[in-house]
Amino acid sequence: MAYRDFPVSGAAVTSVDLRFLCDLPAYKVTKPYYFSGPLPAGCPVPRTNLEYTALPQQPLTNLRGHEHGLSLDKHGMQIVRVPADVLQLDLANPDDVDSYMVRMAELLKQQLDATAVFCYNYKFRSSQPLAGTATPRASLGTHANPDTPAEAAHIDHTPQSARKRAKRHLTEDEATAYLNDHWRLRIVNVWKPLRVVHDHDLLFCDPSTVDPHDDLLVVDRASSAYAGEVYMLKPRTHYRWYWIKDQTPDEASIFVSYDSHCPRGSAPYCPHTSAQRKCDTRHPAPDAGEARESMELRMLVISAAAMCN
């Protein structure tokens, strides 16, 4: 079933202002980029040349009640249940964070019938900045210093960046064994709210509404430690956006940002973003003022390429 075939009613559709990278003529001459972390002293180059614009009142469809019909291959995302014992982990404790990464990698390996799953990164996010309360020198994206929700529509990797990312985190023997035509490499995010989400929800775009040749801009994301690429979506009104209303901590969204052997008719990636929704006066959320807090993992998922046929 395609996104458009879910039997949703008109009441499930709301609207939201969405943020996109501007489609500037200058980007045909100079590649768009963003540098994170401290800039070198006296650096004459600006941190970024990214410029954004908003498209107001874009339709947004709630798939609550149909979430179990979503699949990673067909839609680029799906919902998985987080086991009760995993929910008991204290994610403010670094040891429990390690346990959480291991357990969720095991869950993903089972869900996707994978040969191997490697969790290479995690990030905490909060919609309310912790000015003055973050632990000194705590890395951005940790529990002590959470990052903010990403509010420009994007895809986490280009194909070139995905293979570079895999080589960075696999051993030489693993890279030799798995980065070839016999194996399917996917990079999959596992996003879990830490409390019920009432705003700044995670929003997903139907990949079939995105033209890879005309709707995407390749953007450099660099730091002193690493340089990669992401896709950012140009401002277009033909995209179709979806969300799961009131997502709970035991509902993890898994979505794909790269697939080396995407079967015909499957989703090779899942464009996504976050946005502050207009207040739903029909069903006002009692805790709408609470911060959206979440944790996401990034995984390398290895499966036999023959299974894609």
Image (tube, rainbow, N blue to C red):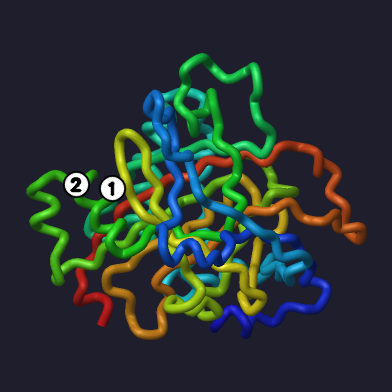
Question: Label 2 is placed on what type of residue?
Answer: Leu
- Residue depicted at 33% across the width and 67% down the height: 259
Q: Is residue 269 visible?
A: yes
Q: Image check: 190 left or right of 259?
A: right
Q: Is residue 256 visible?
A: no
Position of residue 54 measured from the top left corner of the image (x, y, whole percent): 69, 60
Q: Label 2: which residue?
A: 170
Q: CA distance from mark 2 to mark 1?
A: 8 Å
Q: Image check: 286 left or right of 67?
A: right
Q: Nearer the viewer, mark 2 or mark 1?
A: 2
- Residue depicted at 51% across the width and 14% down the height: 136
- Label disc, if present, on residue 49 of the rendered structure: none
Q: Nearer the viewer, residue 196 or 50?
A: 50
Query: Considering only order in the chain, which callout, 1 or 2, is on the residue closer to the N terminus?
Result: 1
35, above or below 240, in the image: above
Q: Label 1: which residue?
A: 118
Q: Image check: 203 left or right of 207?
A: right
Label 2 Cα crowd, 10 Å radius (few <14 / some 14-19 / many 20+): some
The residue most toward the right is 281
12, above or below 176, in the image: below
31, above or below 13, in the image: above
Q: Nearer the viewer, residue 16 or 50?
A: 50
Position of residue 121 measured from the top left corner of the image (x, y, whole percent): 37, 41
Does the CB distance between marks 2 and 1 fall below 8 Å?
yes
Secondary structure at badge 1 equals strand
